[in-house]
Amino acid sequence: MLQFDSSRYCVRTMEVDGQAVTFRAFENIVTVEHPVDPRYQAVSIYVPEAFYHGETVCGYDLHTAPILFENNIGGFFPSEPRNPEHEMFGHTSTFFYALLHGYVIATPGARGRTNQAADGRFYGKAPAALIDLKAALRYLWANEDAIPGDMHHMFSIGTSAGGCFAALTGTYDNQADCEPFLAELGTASGKEELFAVCCYCPVTDLEHADAAYEWQFQGIPDYHRMHMEMDEGGRPQFSAEDGVMTQRQIQLSDELAAAFPTYLNSLGLNAPDGSPLALDSDGSGSFRDFLSRKIADAAQQALDAGRTVDCPAFTVRDGRVTAVDFSAFMRFITRMKEAPPFDDVTMHSFENNLFGEPNEEYAHFTAFSYQRSTCPQPTMASSAVLKLMNPLSYIREGSNLVPHWRFRQGTNDRDVGFATVAIIALALQNQGVDVDYALIWHENHGGDFDLPELFQWIDGLCSAESRGQ
Ligand code: DHB
């Protein structure tokens, strides 16, 4: 068995804005017996050093601190475990503030879509990252007594592609389908339990993400995005990329948008108050009204906090957002991607790259784009892999789910449709688990933009649990 060695660590201090935290770092611990790539099949654990001197931090100690199982996956790329000192685009990492707040961090690495062996074979295609996260969870549970923090209060957190994988760690019924992959790596015991999951802007339900996006941006042909390139010093440089979709893309957009109501209605979702959510064939209906209300709630919260909300899609009376014009709001935030945004007919999107086979760099994952592919030799992902990569495959009556969930998406997120995130949040809520889902005014596609609220949610759940609620 892979044993956690509590004597292998270093102690570091980190200081930001006059605040300092000293922590114990157990880094890059390989989590499987037979790693394909030990750089990624690893976990790093960070613990407030004060815990080892009998002190508490924000009421937590070495045995009661929640564990943040936050992944670092972005763009479905490979990701090594990240350290607290790591700055992303100049922002102090969440891990610094989490340590300052008395949390333990157990951050997993994961293989990703671009991993390629010397013989040319790709070894990080779907579902590799999910398997690596599950392997890390099994490693932690197998060492339950030695791992710092409270294993019964473990929070799986991720953003965007990482949010998709965080969601996938929250449905236990996928365990049987993952078992063969896990067995091959030589993982520890079968336990993978989590207390809660927090997804920021998850890029998920990929088979239907195109239709959801096109339904949202229906009739909006122009796109606006930033193109990122690394300069010689490894710093990201951004330039504006604006354009108008071609006639063919507009036609594809219309077809996808028209298909969305049938999909949405097939889910039989209900709002938290129990009322059914549906769409008419023209794209209007109670589900769209539900999303308009979520947008209004986000704007209202900003107004109530004394912020200025300037958006032509809103009717505001006496400081209250009384109406939202859904289409006008989408014209206001603008489309970012051309149709189809995920399963690209040229078969070259991030997601096409995620779904290749070991000997294929790209694959389609919807019948829609496969049938309309402009690739000379289009390929299609297997239904078994598609099932594994979609949390909705495992969210149904009687399914075995993590009890607490939180979803956050910025109202300026144009990477993934609002419907995609709402659908998974509602599907979970309809199964009776605890779901806290909100849009956040003016935030972009990203994560950890609301650390005080995130920490409040974590602390609230942990203290409610210890009070037996
Ligand atoms: C991410 C962003 C995307 O636009 C996408 O299609 C997939 C992943 C990301 O930020 O992880």
Image (spheres, helix red, strand yellow):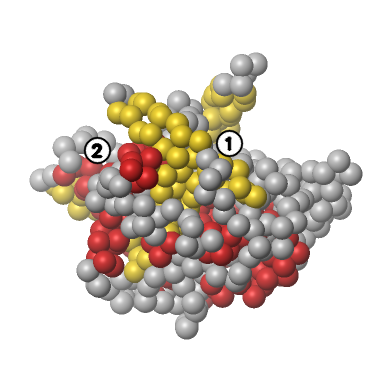
* Image point (47%, 82%), residue name: 397
Circle number at residue 198? none
* Image point (17%, 41%), residue name: 305
Question: Which residue position is annotated with label 2?
Answer: 309
**Element class at badge 2:** loop
Q: Position of residue 59 (x, y in %)?
A: 24, 51
In this view, the residue farthest toward the right is 119
**Element class at badge 1:** strand
Q: Position of residue 239 (x, y in %)?
A: 55, 23
- Quadrant of the rendering where the N terminus is positioned: bottom right
Q: Is residue 132 visible?
A: no
Q: Residues within 10 Å of mark 2 (few under 14, many from 20)?
A: some
- Given contact means CB atoms under 8 Å apart, are the residues at marks 1 and 2 in contact? no
Q: Residues within 10 Å of mark 1 (few under 14, many from 20)?
A: few
Circle number at residue 244? 1
In the image, 340 versus 163, the foreground residue is: 163
Q: At label 2, which amino acid type do we have?
A: Val
Figure quadrant of residue 263? bottom right
Q: Earlier in the sequence, mark 1 or mark 2?
A: 1
- Quadrant of the rendering where the C terminus is positioned: bottom left
Please say if 394 is above or below 390: below
Mark 1 to mark 2: distance in Å? 28 Å
Q: Position of residue 187 (x, y in %)?
A: 67, 63
